[in-house]
């Protein structure tokens, strides 16, 4: 139990510390609002698409493919997103935060934390690739659709009917740099094209900027007083992300016979930190970003303990070794 807690703390607290650093540097006027805006723009248009492209392009999809597992990841992701979206539309009083709330509830740091968790526990991270394959493309596709359809700028415009929203959503999907990066990575992997060393190192350096820049931007752009207005949706999103989704889908996964690496990868997919990329996307697609940033902070702070709890429970039940 102690080892699991220490490992979880070592995985999540550095992310929290970088956010705090960003906040402190902004207060000292070392990081400006212009930096936050440009950092978000750079991550959204360059670093994150490169990271997703490289993750998928260097994955041998054919060799490690497990159709049932990938399908389960995709089904769990789709079901959770749609249910959360419907409930948010029905229950949230402030309709302007529906898009941010939904994305913050479902979108994990699967690509960033998945490999690290599994590698640490099992010495290999093969199953993280399949989990990423089944979830990350859907994360991003749904994020573009939801953030577009639930855009505050669209909802404020009386002239924007559903037809215009759908058209704008389709345009957003086709031109979204993150989705283009995913599509290019899939094609590269399926064609088994070689990745030259110089190209791979260059892409790796760019991809490595994604998390630090996004975390600094969250911290520097964090509005404490504004976040107080979103305490209730932040708490609900945090509980949904860290507790409810794992509680619903992990028993199903056990029922279908998934164990060990596959189960740990699902735990990361369902119950890990809300990805900093969600904050970047929300800001770049016309949303305030305060709620998303708040949920990133709270899930990062509490996920070390929730992930430790889930690991302990799964080990106690003999589901993971």
Image (tube, rainbow, N blue to C red):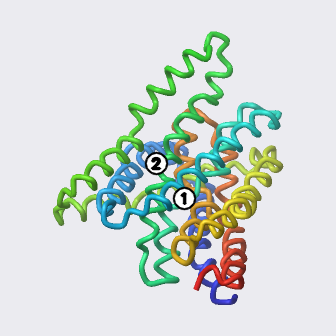
Q: In the rendering, at what x and y percent does residue 142 appear?
A: 55, 40
Viewport quadrant of the N terminus? bottom right
* Direction from residue 254 to residue 68 in the image, left or right: left
At horizontal 66% and vertical 84% (from top left) the residue drawn is 318
Secondary-structure class at tag 2: helix
Q: CA distance from mark 2 to mark 1?
A: 21 Å
**Residue 214 in view here:** yes
Q: Nearer the viewer, residue 140 or 129?
A: 129
Q: Nearer the viewer, residue 173 or 206?
A: 173
At horizontal 67% and vertical 63% (from top left) the residue drawn is 252
Q: In the rendering, at what x and y percent does residue 132 appear?
A: 46, 59
> Alpha-carbon neighbours of circle 2 within 10 Å: few (<14), some, or many (≥20)?
some
* As drawn, 83 above or below 130: above
Viewport quadrant of the C terminus? bottom right
Q: Nearer the viewer, residue 242 or 286?
A: 242
For marks 2 and 1 on the same chain, the one whose residue lies earlier in the sequence? 2
Q: In the rendering, at what x and y percent does residue 215 appear?
A: 54, 58
Q: Quadrant of residue 274?
A: bottom right
* As drawn, 313 above or below 296: below
**Residue 205 in view here:** no
At horizontal 51% and vertical 27% (from top left) the residue drawn is 169
Q: Which residue is mark 2?
A: 137
Q: In the rendering, at what x and y percent does residue 176 appear?
A: 42, 36
The mark found on residue 215 in the picture is: 1
* Direction from residue 74 to residue 1 in the image, left or right: right
At horizontal 52% and vertical 71% (from top left) the residue drawn is 262
Mark in the foreground, 2 or 1: 2
């Amino acid at each position: 139990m102690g080892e699991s807690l220490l490992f979880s703390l070592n995985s999540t607290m550095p992310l929290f510390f970088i956010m705090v650093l960003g906040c402190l540097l902004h207060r000292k006027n070392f990081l400006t609002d212009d930096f936050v805006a440009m950092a978000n723009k750079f991550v959204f248009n360059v670093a994150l698409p490169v990271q997703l492209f490289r993750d998928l392009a260097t994955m041998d999809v054919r060799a490690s493919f497990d159709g049932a597992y990938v399908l389960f990841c995709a089904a769990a992701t789709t079901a959770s997103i749609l249910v959360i979206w419907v409930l948010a539309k029905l229950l949230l009083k402030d309709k302007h935060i529906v898009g941010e709330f939904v994305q913050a509830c479902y979108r994990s740091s699967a690509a960033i934390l998945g490999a690290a968790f599994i590698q640490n526990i099992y010495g290999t991270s093969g199953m993280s690739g399949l989990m990423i394959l089944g979830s990350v493309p859907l994360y991003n596709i749904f994020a573009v659709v939801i953030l577009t359809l639930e855009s505050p700028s669209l909802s404020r415009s009386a002239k924007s009917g559903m037809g215009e929203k759908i058209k704008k959503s389709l345009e957003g999907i086709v031109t979204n740099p993150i989705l283009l990066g995913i599509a290019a990575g899939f094609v590269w992997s399926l064609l088994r094209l070689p990745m030259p060393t110089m190209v791979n190192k260059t892409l790796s350096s760019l991809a490595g900027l994604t998390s630090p820049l996004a975390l600094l931007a969250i911290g520097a752009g964090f509005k404490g007083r504004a976040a107080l207005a979103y305490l209730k949706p932040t708490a609900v999103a945090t509980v949904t992300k860290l507790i409810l989704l794992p509680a619903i889908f992990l028993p199903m996964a056990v029922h279908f016979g998934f164990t060990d690496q596959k189960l740990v990868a699902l735990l990361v997919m369902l119950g890990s930190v809300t990805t900093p990329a969600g904050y970047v996307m929300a800001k770049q697609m016309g949303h305030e970003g305060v709620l998303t940033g708040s949920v990133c902070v709270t899930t990062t702070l509490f996920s070390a303990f929730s992930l430790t709890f889930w690991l302990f429970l799964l080990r106690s039940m003999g589901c993971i070794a």
